[in-house]
């Protein structure tokens, strides 16, 4: 796949699976449904071609009713062509990366993705599409029940109808419920609309649609309002892949990553730059994570062999329609994005199509055809110094979102005290903020990673002090979101590190990933994670950086010790002696408490106080040589029955259990029992 996609293999893949058709399926309406196949898929059943789908990030299905009716067995074949590379600008995975279903229904049924629920206060409007696949006209009743989180039916509505042979009929129903429990980030309450089709007194089809009741308004002067509360967008962009797990992310790990971002203080994820798997939206509904749902990276070529270059023109309308119909009932989805850094008159048509299928949500894009968008979205350009001076004029009076803002680069546990700018400083085009160096001379030196030793000036490890930037620090961004009323919020690039974009960003091999995340590819939190916690969550916390193991450091060298905290006051101790108390500030350069501490081996302890009382603390110390291996589990442990997956965190420690940050010891695993690595 080359540097854009992390040097991983691609090509042409074939799948084949034979299933037995049970007698109970005969005469039913049956579909095979694919949640995600990357890319250029062709599907056959018993040698008959069912169809092709070029886009790799879309869900789709095919009717196999006649084949099932006339066969005792069905052999499916799927050809996936991801041979021409690069087919995107980051790692995509190859092949079937999401669930695949056989959906068995009656001949008269609710169309898949055919229920559309929207709410206004306590009023619920439901549109239901019913299709009669049989050869006779059907006299029916549609009962839609509203069921609360406890499973209790709180309201229902019944409509009588007649549906002709092979006819699709849309039924509009309206009902109200008393005192609904609203969906929000804090209380993600969900309801279900249960659709039941009756023929006489017999239920011939049942279909469940999960939804939430919430009121969202977008106001140019103040941004987003949810249920009467002004909510700042504290977002991240995230790709589909999860490091070593690739694009086929197990549900348990996906849940862990969403919760991890929520624990960081994130309240919304931008699906950059493509729809994610259906369960992602389900989990966001359940966990209280909002979503900017994005459909395309480009409307024209951006990678050599991508969808924009080959198939966008012929397929965008079908793909966009299927995408919105699939996702429009999720309360977590609060805004659509139709593109990323793309220009073209087609923007007008894209927005119009979104409005036609779902008029309840605004549409934006990453500075793509901005004049046609409901919400003015700008990527990295919105980070530049002076951007907000002309915001009202540039936005045309619309709500403004930083769709990809901010960009900082950091590696877990690596530090520099001299500010690093991706494009150098000063750079008139980028107009970066000037970030003072932390020390006059660089404190941390490692000869093997100095810029002079690399073939490209970008091939370096960047600093976790929040001083390796494109245009601004994360602290600048946090302060701007908080303090500028008409700044609705932004999506940092990124929440988690991801595979790919190694050439443009990092100069190519040996780098295979993008290091802009607050969390790395193994789901380990970087120092940046705790900066956001200190500004975006209320649970008391303190976090010390850097680590205090520096075997090459000259004794007495003054090291900037930072503590991130949301407490009133922080006190730092070295070997039990207080180095003084500092109150975290609100200005961007005062969010961290800083002490200049002369280096020598020892123990640092940070204590956080609220209302004069100690409420939290963290201790780190200089580690001796690595001599032990510590194992711990991220998230829930391994289930005792069935199939499951667990993340085991492996830490090299000294004999007292302190992490040794430079540990590169090769670790070998032996599994006893049914498990595997």
Image (spheres, rainbow, N blue to C red):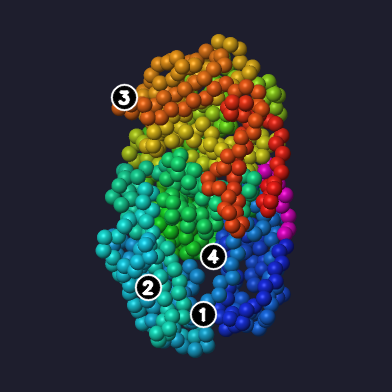
Question: Which-is-in-front pick, marks 2 and 4?
Answer: 2
Query: What's the mark number on residue 612?
Result: 3
Label 2 with label 1: CB-CB less than 8 Å: no
x and y, in percent, of residue 352 in the image = 44, 60
To which residue does mark 4 refer?
318
| Residue at the extreme bottom of the image, as rendered | 136
At label 4, counting other C-alpha atoms closer than 10 Å, the crowd grade (few under 14, some 14-19, many 20 or more) is few
Q: What is the spatial separation of the Cα atoms under label 2 and label 3, in whole angstroms?
A: 56 Å
Distance from label 3 to label 1 (Cα)? 67 Å
Magenta residues span 2-13
**Label 2 element class:** strand
Q: Nearer the viewer, residue 9 or 533?
A: 533
Q: CA distance from mark 3 to mark 4?
A: 61 Å
N-terminal of the pair, mark 3 or mark 4, is 4
Instruction: Specify which label sits upstream in the sequence, 2 or 1.
Output: 1
Q: Is residue 5 magenta?
A: yes
Q: Residue 155, how many percent across, how many down?
A: 31, 70
Q: Pointer 1: what residue?
A: 106
Cα gap from disc 2 to disc 4, whole angstroms: 28 Å
Q: Quadrant of residue 457?
A: top right
Q: Residue at x 72, y 59 (%)?
A: 13
| Residue 144 numbered mark, or none | 2
Left or right placement of residue 41 versus residue 327 in this view: right
Q: Is residue 276 above or below residue 451?
A: below
The image shows residue 19, relative to residue 431, as above or below, that is below
Q: Could you tell whether 639 is left or right of 45 in the image?
A: left
Q: Secondary structure at mark 4?
A: helix
Q: Which mark is in front, 2 or 3? A: 3
């Amino acid at each position: 796949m080359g540097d854009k996609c992390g040097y991983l293999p691609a090509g042409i893949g074939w799948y084949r699976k034979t299933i037995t058709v049970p007698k109970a399926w005969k005469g039913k309406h049956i579909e095979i449904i694919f949640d995600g196949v990357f890319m250029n898929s062709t599907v056959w059943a018993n040698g008959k071609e069912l169809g092709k789908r070029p886009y790799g990030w879309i869900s789709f299905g095919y009717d196999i009713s006649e084949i099932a009716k006339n066969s005792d067995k069905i052999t499916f074949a799927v050809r996936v062509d991801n041979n021409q590379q690069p087919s995107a600008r980051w790692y995509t995975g190859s092949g079937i990366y999401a669930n695949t279903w056989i959906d068995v229904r009656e001949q008269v049924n609710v169309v898949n993705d055919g229920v559309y629920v929207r709410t206004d206060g306590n009023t619920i409007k439901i549109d239901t599409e019913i299709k009669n696949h049989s050869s006779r006209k059907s006299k029916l009743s549609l009962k839609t029940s509203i069921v609360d989180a406890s499973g209790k039916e709180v309201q229902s509505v019944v409509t009588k109808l007649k549906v002709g042979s092979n006819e699709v009929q849309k039924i509009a129903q309206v009902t109200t419920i008393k005192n609904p429990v609203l969906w929000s980030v804090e209380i993600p309450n969900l309801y279900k609309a249960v659709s039941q089709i009756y023929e006489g007194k017999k239920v011939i089809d049942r279909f469940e649609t999960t939804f939430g009741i919430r009121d969202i308004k977008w106001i140019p002067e103040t941004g987003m309002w949810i249920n009467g509360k002004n909510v700042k967008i504290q977002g991240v962009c995230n790709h589909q892949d999860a490091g070593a797990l690739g694009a086929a992310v197990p549900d348990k790990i996906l849940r862990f990553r969403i919760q991890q971002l929520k624990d960081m203080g994130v309240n919304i994820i931008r699906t950059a730059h493509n729809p994610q798997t259906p369960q992602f939206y389900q989990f966001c509904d359940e966990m209280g994570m909002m979503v900017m749902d994005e459909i395309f990276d480009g409307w024209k070529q951006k990678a050599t062999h991508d969808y924009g270059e080959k198939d966008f023109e012929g397929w965008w309308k079908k793909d966009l329609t299927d995408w919105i119909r699939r996702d429009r009932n999720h309360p977590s989805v609060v805004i659509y994005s139709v593109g990323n850094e793309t220009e073209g008159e087609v923007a007008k048509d894209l927005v119009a199509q979104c409005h036609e299928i779902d008029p309840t949500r605004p549409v934006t894009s990453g500075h793509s055809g901005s004049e046609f968008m409901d919400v003015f979205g700008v990527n990295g350009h919105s980070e530049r110094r002076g951007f907000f001076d002309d915001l009202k004029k540039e936005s045309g009076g619309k709500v403004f979102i930083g769709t990809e803002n901010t960009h900082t680069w950091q590696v877990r546990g690596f530090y520099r005290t001299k500010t690093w700018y991706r494009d150098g400083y000063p750079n008139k085009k980028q107009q970066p903020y000037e970030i003072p160096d932390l020390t006059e001379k660089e404190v941390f030196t490692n000869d093997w990673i100095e810029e002079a030793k690399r073939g490209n000036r970008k091939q370096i490890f960047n600093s976790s002090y929040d001083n390796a930037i494109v245009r601004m620090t994360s602290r600048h961004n946090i302060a701007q979101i908080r303090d500028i009323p008409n700044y609705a919020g932004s999506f940092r690039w990124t929440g988690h590190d991801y595979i790919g974009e190694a050439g443009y960003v990092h100069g190519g091999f040996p780098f295979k990933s993008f290091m802009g995340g607050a969390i790395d590819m193994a789901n380990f939190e970087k120092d940046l994670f705790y900066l956001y916690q200190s500004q975006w969550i209320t649970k008391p916390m303190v976090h010390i950086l850097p680590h205090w193991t520096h075997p090459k450091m000259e004794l007495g060298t003054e090291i900037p010790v930072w503590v991130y905290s949301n407490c009133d006051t922080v006190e730092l101790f070295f070997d039990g002696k207080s180095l003084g108390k500092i109150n975290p500030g609100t200005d961007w350069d005062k969010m961290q408490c800083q002490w200049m501490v002369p280096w020598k081996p020892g123990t640092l302890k940070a204590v956080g106080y609220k209302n004069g009382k100690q409420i939290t603390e963290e201790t780190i110390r200089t580690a001796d040589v690595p001599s032990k291996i510590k194992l711990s589990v991220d998230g829930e442990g391994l289930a005792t029955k069935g199939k499951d997956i667990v993340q085991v965190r492996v830490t090299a420690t000294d004999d007292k259990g302190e992490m040794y940050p430079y540990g590169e010891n090769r670790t070998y695993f032996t599994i006893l029992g049914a498990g595997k690595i």
